Amino acid sequence: MDSQSSLVILFVFLLPVIFWLLIKQRRKSSASQGRRLPPGPRRLPLIGNLHKLPNGLPHHVLEHLALQYGPLMFLQLGSISTLVVSSDHMASEIFKTHDLVFSGRPVLYVANKLSYGCVNLAFAPYGEYWREMRKIVILELLSAKRVQMFQSVRDEEVGLMLDSIAHSKGLINLTQLTLFLTNNVLCRSAFGKKYDDGGGIGKSRIHGLLEETRALLGGFFLSDFLPWLSWLNKFNGLEKKVEKCFKGLDNFYDRVIEEHLDSRRPKPEHEDLVDVLLRVQRDPNQAIPLSNDQIKGVLTDMFIAGTDTSSATLVWTMAELIRNPLVLRKAQDEVRSVLKGKSKVEESDLSELMYLKLVLKESFRLHPAVPLLLPRETLKSCTIEGYEIPTTTMVFIHAKMIGKDPECWENPNEFWPERFLDSSIDYKGNHFELLPFGAGRRGCPGISFSVKLIELALANLLYRFDWELPHGVRREDLDMEDAAGLVVSKKVPLFLAAKPVHPSLTNYVAQ
Ligand code: HEM
């Protein structure tokens, strides 16, 4: 036998045997340490499941598996150990008993690139930097006082949306309108204006850029589960796509920062978020020096976390209301009797709209905009229900499954806001059967910012218009399928017919 054939034999027969023996040995040694893992498939046909990227890891695939393997399920996704949690009891174990251990975030390829190397808040690794960033976000950017300052922005933008509905002739595309609403509110709050002024970055440009960013951030990619394959991203076009998107965002932020630093800029009535971040940057007492890249990272956070989540929630709520005419009627009766002929709903009226608040809770229960929350990562190993969960395990909390768990909810698939009457359950992270905003240290800091806008928009939509399905579409035929992605909106845009209730009130903003 020549040396070439010996080499072939070595590669073809011996190497696989050596690998097999090594793996067997590893399994044996972990078993001998008494380590148990929760039930679940140890291997998923990764390429088969994930080839349709960037569609992500669909929450219904995990739901299907969790129904089979239970509320604490372990998956081996490529080289990433993954835990899927889908009961309120287990969620409470994680958020209450072991919150610190579960406060990491895995490093994902696109998120890392678009967040300037995870220097934002949402993807920052747990630690001192994240703590300081979180302080800035909670105390400065999304504090109750700051959210209150943006009241006039919300009011005007909701007014513009209502005007556009009142003046449109055909069906209303609520999916598009609500996305414009949330984008515009966020643009004005964060950057001080909408950037639809023809000054180089037109409406379509910034909206397009954000859509591109969202689509990329909303997915998982093969290299997230097989990091040693990240070199492939150069060849499959992903790297180029991400670079282009990053450049677009970066140029936009540079322009915004430059404009804010321009001494000729008129002093705004209220600081916007860029003003605040630049002020914090100048503060010599700041615990961490804030670079421009870190500011840009946080701005991406605000945009990505704060726009389509709120618009998806508005669309899901309107879709459920149209499918449940008694609930719709009741919510409209409430807002119309509380407002008693006023021209518009204002934020000061919202505290009286008790039924509307129940409707929103019910919508968060059935359609949490981020059904798997943002993935967490364990900082060290810990024991849950007698199972040892290894360090650096990626963790998904299946908020959508928990929201439909018959153990927690009577008739879970029914849209029935009355279930929250005389119940203290809310969505702020204290009740683990309702987790649309997550919970614990890394829970969403934007609850108040989003809920104020959602409630105001919803109340006005119900007050000002009667809503109907397009001619010939039956309630039971309304498509309620989820779109793919981390933030899950309704797959098919929601088109409805709107009839103004007070035909004289067509110019809402002018009232
Ligand atoms: C309906 C609206 C919203 C929903 C459903 C939502 C949901 C979530 C969820 C599920 C998480 C992950 C929580 C966890 O890991 O436990 C999160 C985190 C986050 N959200 Fe929201 N969110 C919304 C609105 C907003 C808004 C308006 C902002 C900012 C303007 C925002 C900023 C953030 C940030 C920065 C994080 C990361 C926090 C951290 O890692 O420390 N969100 N959000």
Image (cartoon, rainbow, N blue to C red):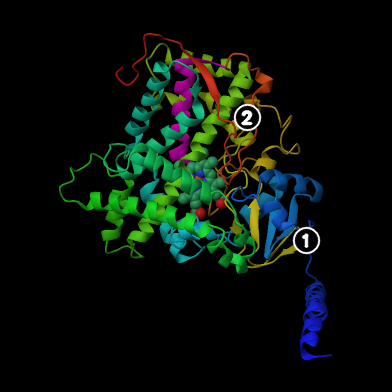
Nearest the viewer among 458 and 500 is 500
Q: Which residue is mark 1?
A: 42
Q: Is residue 413 above or below residue 123?
A: above
Residue for point 53% across, 14% down: 333
Q: Is residue 204 left or right of residue 175?
A: left
Q: Residue furthest left?
A: 264
**Does the magenta stretch mainly form a helix, a strand or a loop?**
helix
Residue 142 placed where, x, y %?
40, 45
Q: Is residue 466 magenta?
A: yes
Residue 441 placed where, x, y %?
53, 54
Q: Which residue is mark 2?
A: 420
Residue for point 30% across, 39% down: 193
* Amino acid type of the residue tagged 2 in the rendering: Phe
Which quadrant would the C terminus be assigned to in this image? Answer: top left
Q: Is residue 169 above or below residue 439?
A: above
Q: Earlier in the sequence, mark 1 or mark 2?
A: 1
Quarter where residue 419 is shown: top right
Quarter where residue 199 is shown: top left
- Kindly state the secondary structure of the residue where label 2 is placed: helix
Q: Of the numbered discs in the image, which one, if any, rests on residue 374?
A: none
Q: Is mark 2 within 8 Å of ligand 1?
A: no
Nearest the viewer among 100 and 475 is 475
* Amino acid type of the residue tagged 1 in the rendering: Arg
| Residue 325 in sight from this viewpoint | yes
Q: Is residue 401 magenta?
A: no
Q: Is residue 332 above or below residue 391?
A: above
Q: Which residues are magenta?
A: 446-468
